[in-house]
Amino acid sequence: MIRPLRDVPARPDLLLPALEAALAGSGPAVAPGSAGGTTGGVGEDVAVVVRTSGSTGEPRGVLLSATALRASAGATHDRLAGPGHWLLALPTDHVAGLQVLVRSVLAGTSPTVLAAGPFRAVAFAAAVGAMGPTGPRYTSLVPTQLVRLLDDAAATDALRSFDGVLLGGAASSPDLLTRARAAGVAVVTTYGMTETCGGCVYDGRPLAGVAVRLDDDGRILLAGSVLADGYRDRPDLDADAFAQVDGVRHLRTSDLGTWSDGVLAVLGRADDVLVSGGVKIPPGPVEAVVASLPGVSEVCVVGVPDAEWGQAVVAVVVARPDGPPTLEQVRTAVADRLGAPHAPRRLVVTDSLPVRGPGKIDRRAATQLAVRQLERNPT
């Protein structure tokens, strides 16, 4: 049976009633923010079609069923302190922001919506002050937002009022997590993607109904009730992304990880791995070391073409007000922790890291930024 699909602007006041009807089966499926990009219909249980470019930049529509969205929201509330009130601080045409609305609909609560415009700590604190006084309170952020909030005393006080602060969309440095938890913030790291209805692994442990395994190359495979039905009108993508393993449908992610004692550690994307002097270097562990150094606010580790090394490891850093570390300090810290081949050969300091979507660092753009700066300052 075919269900009609309706474009809905990515405005919470318009999306909420449309989502409620879609989840209940009394209205058409919705495509948030598609701006006329959808026509026709979808499968009977599909409630939402989220357009995403994934990591390749190729547009695709991910089919999320009402069953999967309900399973994701229920498992999230079970892991936290139960259904509650949510503060929306992310765009609703991306799965993390959309899920804030879905969880609110299924909890029977009305989300508090951050005012439109650039993300500002003062606006966040004001929005928190407008939230209702009863029941658990939650929000969902990306690391860049958390950094800005922790730099503001009033916003940090506001963060402490939440029973859970979900943090995803990009890798979070151990230093940022330590800082947040030391400030009394109940931060919970999340790992997932649009194809899993957003985060499905919290603080390294899968949500109820989610299974994790690794293939022979260390690639993360995910299974469970939160999986998308597939991609709209793209059976070729379905065949690449989803596979039967031991009779169970799994999503083949693009990420590498380790799995030990029921805890998943994500090392980063398989295609982000750098090869310098013949050594494979995942950027995630290097970024974690650099992010822990004094003077570093944010960091992205990239590889730039190099005649001698093939790729030279470069740390692109956003500095704190007291100034960045020196290249020698960076190299020493990384070499001591991970070995000399992992140590960045160049250090690039910038005002901000390029991002895409709701806060994911754009590694391709960061690489281009590094190349341009190194061309201007080759020594």
Image (cartoon, helix red, strand yellow):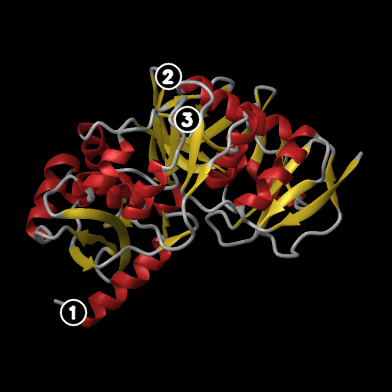
Camera-nearest label, 3 or 1: 3
Q: Residue at x 63, y 30 (%)?
A: 108
The residue type indicated by label 3 comes to Val
- 310 to the left or right of 99: left
Q: Looking at the image, can residue 268 be seen?
A: yes
Q: Nearer the viewer, residue 108 or 238?
A: 108
Calculate the distance from the C-alpha at mark 1 to the C-alpha at mark 2: 46 Å
The residue type indicated by label 1 comes to Asn
Q: Nearer the viewer, residue 284 or 151?
A: 151
Local packing at callout 1 (Cα closer than 10 Å; few below 14, some 14-19, many 20+) is few
Question: Residue 201 — which label?
Answer: 3
Q: Residue at x 25, y 46 (%)?
A: 154
Q: Is residue 9 above or below residue 304?
A: above
Mark toward the start of the polypeptide (2 vs 3):
3
Residue 291, given in percent of the width and then of the height, sits at 21, 48
Name the residue tied to disc 1: 377
Figure quadrant of the C terminus: bottom left
Question: Residue 362 — which label?
Answer: none
Badge 3 element? strand
Q: Is residue 298 above or below residue 72?
A: below
Badge 2 element? loop
Q: Nearer the viewer, residue 359 or 288?
A: 359
- 248 to the left or right of 355: right
Q: Residue at x 37, y 32 (%)?
A: 162
Name the residue tied to disc 2: 262
Mark toward the start of the polypeptide (1 vs 2):
2
Residue farthest right in this picture: 1
- 148 to the left or right of 365: left
Calculate the distance from the C-alpha at mark 3 to the C-alpha at mark 1: 42 Å
Residue 21, given in percent of the width and then of the height, sits at 77, 39
